[in-house]
Amino acid sequence: MQCYRPVSPVKAMTFDLDDTLYDNEPIIASATQALNNRIAELYPATAALPASQWAAIKRDLIKGNRGLASDMGRLRYEALYQGLAEEQLHDDQRHQAAQSLFDYFYHARSDFAVTDEVRQVLAALAAKVPLIAITNGNVDTVQIGIDEFFTATYHASLSRPSKPHRHMFDEAANTLGLAPQAILHVGDNLEKDVLGAHRAGLQTAWIAVNRPMDLRYEDVSVLPSVHLHSLAELLWFVA
């Protein structure tokens, strides 16, 4: 552990999920391939759309509704709905098809379990202080086996701007009934997690499981309160 500033007593913690508790990139890649295979099996005209057209669909959707930039789940559903225009379906069939494809992806996206070590650390922390999950993604915390450790889970959405916006950090502090400085936010991204939490007045702990943690190769606007070398080091703050 490396400390960059004094840490005041920690009465609660908030956690990013993707790339903080597990390596998310291969999970998303696998789920995306599974979705593409499903589309090819059921909707060949939609499957024939080039990647550039899918990207254009998403750009146009965000232009029409900026909130979709924060809601990855809704954006994916709306993109699927637009892409399915190639199939000449009735509108209700098209909605059902988009929902079915999204549900298929969502299950595949959450079709993994965190390591026993992560579960053990979360369990030990949750026995000492309340924990809240704050994520820009949409992983199903029940399916991956960690929901029991969190008193609440906030996903970025149309009504919850994505990090580094302070909305979810403020919401967590309000839910916990604590001053922000009594909360330690744990995350991998030095902009979305560390800078976002810092702006909201929270203390911060930086840990990434998907890459070497070397500040020379990161976009740094503000240093975290602490740089962790393992998740278990968080137990020092609740002993």
Image (spheres, rainbow, N blue to C red):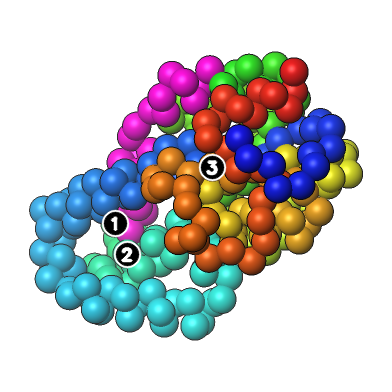
For the residues labelled 2 and 3, the Cα–Cα distance comes to 34 Å
Q: Position of residue 199 (x, y in %)?
A: 76, 61
Mark-to-mark CA distance, 3 and 1:
39 Å
Q: x%, y% of residue 23?
A: 38, 42
Q: Nearer the viewer, mark 3 or mark 1?
A: 3
User: Of helix, strand and loop, which one carries label 3?
Assistant: loop
Residue sitting at x 52%, y 69%: 69
Q: Residues within 10 Å of mark 3 (few under 14, many from 20)?
A: many
Hey, what amino acid is under mark 2? Leu
Nearest the camera: 9 or 120? 9
> Helix, strand or loop at disc 2?
helix
Q: Specify whether 144 is left or right of 206.
A: left
Q: Which residue is mark 1?
A: 97
Which corner quadrant holds the C terminus?
A: top right
The residue range painted magenta reads 98-120
Does the magenta segment cover residue 184?
no
Q: Decide which of tag 3 and tag 1 comes sooner along the chain.
A: 1
Q: Which residue is labeled 3 in the image?
A: 207
Residue visible at 58% across and 64% down in the picture: 220
Q: Is residue 42 visible?
A: no
What is the x, y in percent for residue 211? 39, 48
